[in-house]
Amino acid sequence: MNSSSLDLTLASRLANIAPFHVMELAKMATELERQGRHIIHMGIGEPDFTAAQPVIDAAARAMADGRLQYTSATGIPALREAIAAHYQRVYGLQIAPSRIIVTAGASAALLLACAALVEKDAEVLMPDPSYPCNRHFVAAFDGKAKMIPSGPEQRFQLSDAKVRENWSAVTGGVLLASPSNPTGTSIPHQELAKIVATVRETNGFTIVDEIYQGLTYDEEPFSALSLGEDVIVINSFSKYFNMTGWRLGWLVVPEKMVPQIEKLAQNLFICASSIAQHAGVACFEPESIAIYEQRKAEFKRRRDYIVPMLRELGFKVPVTPDGAFYVYADCSALSDDADRLTIDMLNRAGVVLVPGLDFGPYTARQYIRLSYATSMENLQEAVNRLRHYFNVRH
């Protein structure tokens, strides 16, 4: 039988997974570049910095020494210990290395957490807007993401009142991100403590994505792990440590969950990249941390430039982002359709921004997300192009 005549029946859960419009815009930008256009990319959330030199050197040593075999599914001891020491140094928290599971990026950590905690048809509460993959991780295990409209009054984050209002008999838990993609906003410590207490009362789970926690600019950073051992935290080497393509992250879980997470990791992933793990240990050396702190200061400088410029261009930025490298800007004074506006800005100004479409229906048509994880020169050129674009357009 010819393979083209086969009619495979695909799993029905695929209907719950929406396309990622960020990547669609990136493809459109690539095609314009192929035609010779110069495009400024402020869509995908990827640092323009790459791994620090000590990290690259550590990876080279691991390869030269032949440390390329499978590791434990939970990660090499040296890396788990280095992460635990990082929590002590930065947050003053004593986290047992045995609670830390090294994963193939934060995505694998979220998959493992959802595999362990999300029951079929259970609802998981999250704010609208949220990083789109979070609701898809829930859907992958036949759960249902309940997107709760969360506007600038709540810093685009869930509040304890909203959690209480939306909790029902079928709610399993909450999935939060602080600081958040797409908004760059954090949940205040006291509000997060209230949410955790509310969820704990109902025997639910709290998962907090902290992959941007290293990039907080206005307040002393804190980890949700300070709120109790039952809080599950996700983190990554991609953002603060600038290692996106290395696919390395971690998951912190209660001690009693470790054997179950390890069992899942063994079956789903075997282990994270051994080279990336050996390199990751070097991220926590003082020389590396000094580099990352300089880069963090540069991200803050870019934020402090681009937010006023967006307001000058006619965008509203109702909440100044306090972390990550995103601005969530209201474009309603400029257009009634953020998706159409971003496509037009790409084609006519050569600037990639992302519509709210990916991040939930509540802000889909009104907001755009800008990533300032690019050079100051690119940001300044983008502002010049957009200023010309809006002048001509009007």
Image: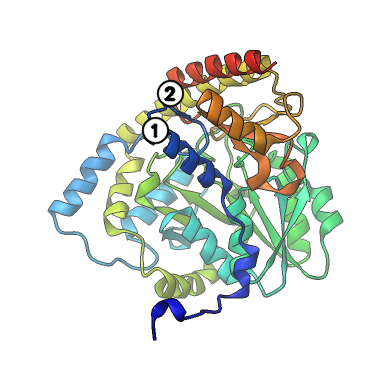
Going by the numbered disc 1, the residue's amino acid type is Gln
Mark 2, Cα crowd under 10 Å, few <14 / some 14-19 / many 20+, is some
Foreground residue among 97 and 38: 38
Q: Quadrant of residue 35?
A: top left
Instruction: Give residue 353's position: percent from left, percent from top.
Output: 57, 33
Say which residue label 1 marks: 35
Task: State how far apart marks 1 and 2 are (Cα).
Answer: 23 Å
At x 61%, y 40%, the residue is 182
- Which label was assigned to residue 282? none
Q: What residue type is disc 2 on?
A: Ser
- Which comes before the other along the chain, label 1 or label 2? 1
Q: Is residue 50 visible?
A: yes
Residue 327 in view of the camera: no
| The C terminus: image quadrant | top right
Badge number at residue 375: 2
Instruction: Decide if residue 20 is on the left or right side of residue 381.
Output: right
Residue 80 percent across, percent down from the top left: 39, 56
Crowd class of label 1 (few under 14; some 14 to 19; many from 20; radius 10 Å): few
Asked if residue 8 lies left or right of residue 155, the reply is: left
Residue under the point 35% across and 53% down? 79
Q: Position of residue 43 (x, y in %)?
A: 52, 36
Relative image position of residue 282 (x, y in whole percent): 30, 43
Q: Nearer the viewer, residue 244 or 199?
A: 244
Secondary structure type for disc 1: loop
Name above or below for residue 32 compared with residue 203.
above
The N terminus - image quarter? bottom left
- Residue name at image x 45 percent, y 39 percent: 46
Q: Residue 190: which quarter of the image? A: top right
